[in-house]
Image (cartoon, rainbow, N blue to C red):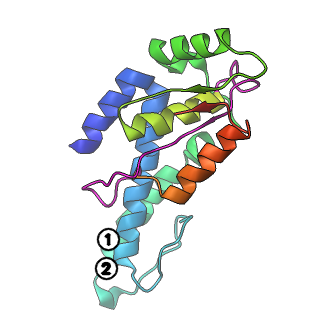
């Protein structure tokens, strides 16, 4: 139910593309956590691919692993659209009017030394918005965005968007100060 609510909020705030980015990241994280639990001897794997986990019938977890593997096969089909560091541009028509207006405002105020901070209320919105900004064709040559989240904890250990460690927060702040990025979420 929480995922459905966050998806709806992302859809209303960011549009279909931002909502799908959130859903992709959230589902992939949930599957990773379940696979980690189902295969404790394997350890956590940062990039899990279909067919990677085959557990023997005698340990009672093969059915779960097979179902999770099927879910991964579905998710992997969307890696080219949503995976980190992808270079594909997004169609702005798949963004909400709020996102388009934000981009228009940022670009209207852009100059050589431009820097900006965009405040949002929810972590999943910040993360998806930063990704959207970095992948919109009219913004990519001028706006370089990174997400900066608070330390806060979440009651759901499988959530894809958790608090950000102090070291990573410091890295984002330093990138902003060095002007490697010029927009922070």
- Looking at the rendered image, the quarter that the N terminus falls into is top left
How many marks the image carries: the answer is 2
Q: Which residue is mark 1?
A: 64
Camera-nearest residue between 99 and 19: 99
Q: Residue furthest bottom?
A: 58
Asked if the stretch drawn in magenta spans residue 98, the answer is: no
Q: Which residue is rendered at x = 27% and y = 56% of the image? A: 156
Describe residue 89's horizontal placement relative to residue 66 as left or right: right
- Depth check: give the residue in front, 84 or 64: 84
Left or right of 24 on screen, residue 105: right
Q: Element at badge 2?
A: loop
Q: Are dots 1 and 2 in contact, CB under 8 Å?
A: yes
Horizontal and vertical percent position of residue 161: 41, 49
- Residue 95 appears at what percent x and percent y? 50, 20
Q: Give the structural element (helix, strand or loop) at label 1.
A: helix
> Compared with residue 98, is residue 89 higher up or lower down, i.e. above or below?
below
**Dot label at residue 180:** none
Q: Is residue 178 left or right of residue 10?
A: right
Q: Is residue 151 on the magenta stretch?
A: yes
Residue that protrudes farthest toward the left in the picture: 1
Q: Nearer the viewer, residue 122 or 152?
A: 152
- Residue position marked by numbered label 2 in the rendering: 61
């Amino acid at each position: 139910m929480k995922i459905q609510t966050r998806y709806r909020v992302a859809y209303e705030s960011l549009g279909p593309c931002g909502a799908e980015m959130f859903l992709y990241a959230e589902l992939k994280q949930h599957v990773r956590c379940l696979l980690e639990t189902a295969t404790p001897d394997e350890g956590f794997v940062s990039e899990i691919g279909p067919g990677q986990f085959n557990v023997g019938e005698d340990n009672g977890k093969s059915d779960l692993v097979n179902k999770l593997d099927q879910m991964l096969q579905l998710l992997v089909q969307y890696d080219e659209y949503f995976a980190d560091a992808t270079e594909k541009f997004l169609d702005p028509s798949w963004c909400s009017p709020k996102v388009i207006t934000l981009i228009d405002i940022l670009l209207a105020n852009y100059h050589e030394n431009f820097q900006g901070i965009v405040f949002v209320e929810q972590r999943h919105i910040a993360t998806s918005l930063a990704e959207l900004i970095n992948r919109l064709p009219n913004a990519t040559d001028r706006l370089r965005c990174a997400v900066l989240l608070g330390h806060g904890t979440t009651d759901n250990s499988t959530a894809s968007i958790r608090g950000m460690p102090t070291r990573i927060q410091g890295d984002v702040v330093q990138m902003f100060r060095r002007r490697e990025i010029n927009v922070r979420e």
